[in-house]
Amino acid sequence: MRIIPFVLTAVLAAGSAQAQPQRPPVPPVVLAHMNDLDARCRAAGGRPDGGRFVFAQDFTGDGRLDYLVSEGDYACTGKPGVFRPGGQARVDIYVADARGQVLRNYSETLIAYRLIAGQPVKVQVARRGAACGAGVAPTAQCAAQLAWNGRGFGEGVAVGAGTTPGGSGSVASPAPTVAGEAAFLVRCRRAYVSAEASAARWADGACKEDWKKVVASAPAAEFLLSVLPAPGARLTAESLRAAAPSVRWAARPADASSFASGRLGAFDITVSGRATPVSASAGWAAVGQPIPYDVVEALRQRGATLTLASCEKLGAGEGTRVFAGHAPGKPPFAVTIEQREAPTASANSFYSASISLDGRAPARGSTSGCDF
C-alpha cells in the first residue's frame, strides 16, 4: 500500500497509481461544481486552467465510482490562492448509490488531505483549530482517516485533537457529512437576519461561533445515530458495544434503571431501560459555563431530518425541545434536548440530548415560546 504524504502548508494534489484525475464526462452534480469553480476563478480576475482537482475512485467500497473534488488543487492562473485562503481549502466527496444517483455526502474545509490506495481508497484529512474540537487552540492541528459507515463518512482512525499528524492525544471530532460549514453559515445568517434586521452587522461572527458548537457535538451525534437499531431489530448489550466502540462503557450501569452507562469525551452516556433499552442520551454539565453544543444541527449534518414537535420553556436559557426524527434505514425516533444555561458564574449549566429507541415518533404539542 502506497501512502501519499500530507502537505500541511496548503491543500495540494493527492495522487497515487490508483488515484488519477477524472476528466469529463462526469455526473451533472460534479460538473456543476467544476463549472462553479471556473466562474469563481474568472470573477476573481483569474484564468481557469483546471488542473488535477477531481478524482474518481471508490471511496465507499461498493464498487461504484465516487468523486472527490479538491478546490485547493484547482489551477486559477493569475489568482493562485483564491481557493486557499489562510492555507485551507474545501474538499467535497460525491457518493454514487445503487440507483445511479450521485450526491454530495461530505464537505469540509481542510489544511491537507491524502488518498491511500486500496479497496476502498482511504481519505485522510488534516484540520486546524476549532475543527479539531471545542477549546482547541486556533493554530493546533489534528488528522483523521474517514471511514464510510453506510450513510456517511465518520472516522475510522484519528490522531489527537490539538496535535499535528503523527502525534497522540484524544480522538478528533467526526467530520460533518451533509451540507457542511458553508451551507450552515448561509442558513444561520438568514435565520438571524430574518428574526432581527440589525443582526446583519453581527450575524456572521455569531454563526461562526454556532458552527463550533456543531463541530463539538459530533461525537454525541455519531453515538446517538449509531445505537438506533434497524427496523424490527433489538438492541442488545453486545450490539450496543459494537455500535459505539468509542464509548468507555462502565462494567455496570450507573443505576438500576439503566441498561448501560459510560463516558464519551466530555459527555456522560446513559442507555435507559432495564431488560430492553428505551432511550440513549449524551449529557454534559458545568458550573457557570455557556452551553458549547448543538446536537440537533450535528444530527442534521449527518443526514437526519429533525422537525420540532414540542417545546417547554422553564426560564431564561432553560427548557426542553422535542424533535420528530427520521434517518435513512432507521425507524422513526424522537430527539429530546434538555438544557439550562447558567445565569450566574456560580450556577450550574447542563445539556442533554437523548434519542428514543422504541421506533415511535413523538406526540405533537405546543411549539410556541421556544426562545430560550
Image (tube, helix red, strand yellow):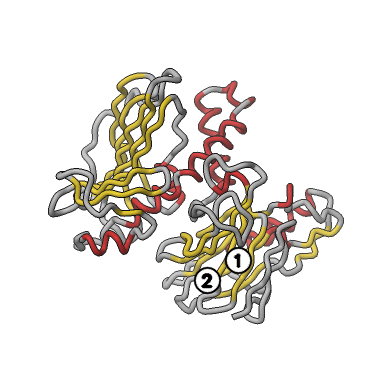
Q: Mark 2 and 1 residues: CB-CB less than 8 Å, in contact? A: yes
How packed is label 1: few (under 14 Cα within 10 Å), some, or many (20 or more)? many
Determine the image quadrant of residue 98. bottom left
Residue 178 seen in render: no
Q: Which residue lies furthest to the left in this view?
A: 275
Residue 259 seen in render: yes
Q: Which of marks 2 and 1 is nearer the N terminus?
A: 2
Question: Residue 12 at what x, y percent from top left?
Answer: 72, 63
Q: In this view, does 353 lie to the left or right of 81?
A: left
- What residue sits 38% from the left and 19% below the top? 316
Disc 1 residue type (three-letter):
Leu
Q: Nearer the viewer, residue 353 or 36?
A: 353
Disc 2 residue type (three-letter):
Phe
Q: Residue 200 carries which label?
A: none
Residue ID for mark 2 = 59
The count of marks equals 2
How packed is label 2: few (under 14 Cα within 10 Å), some, or many (20 or more)? many
The quarter of the image holding the N terminus is: bottom right
Residue ID for mark 1 = 68
Q: In this view, does 102 lie to the left or right of 36?
A: left
Question: Residue 145 at what x, y percent from top left?
Answer: 54, 64
Rounded to the nearest angstrom, the CA distance separating label 2 from label 1 is 9 Å
Question: Residue 140 at what x, y percent from top left?
Answer: 64, 47
- What residue sits 46% from the left and 59% below the top? 154
- In this rendering, is residue 176 above or below 284? below
Q: In this view, does 195 lie to the left or right of 83?
A: left
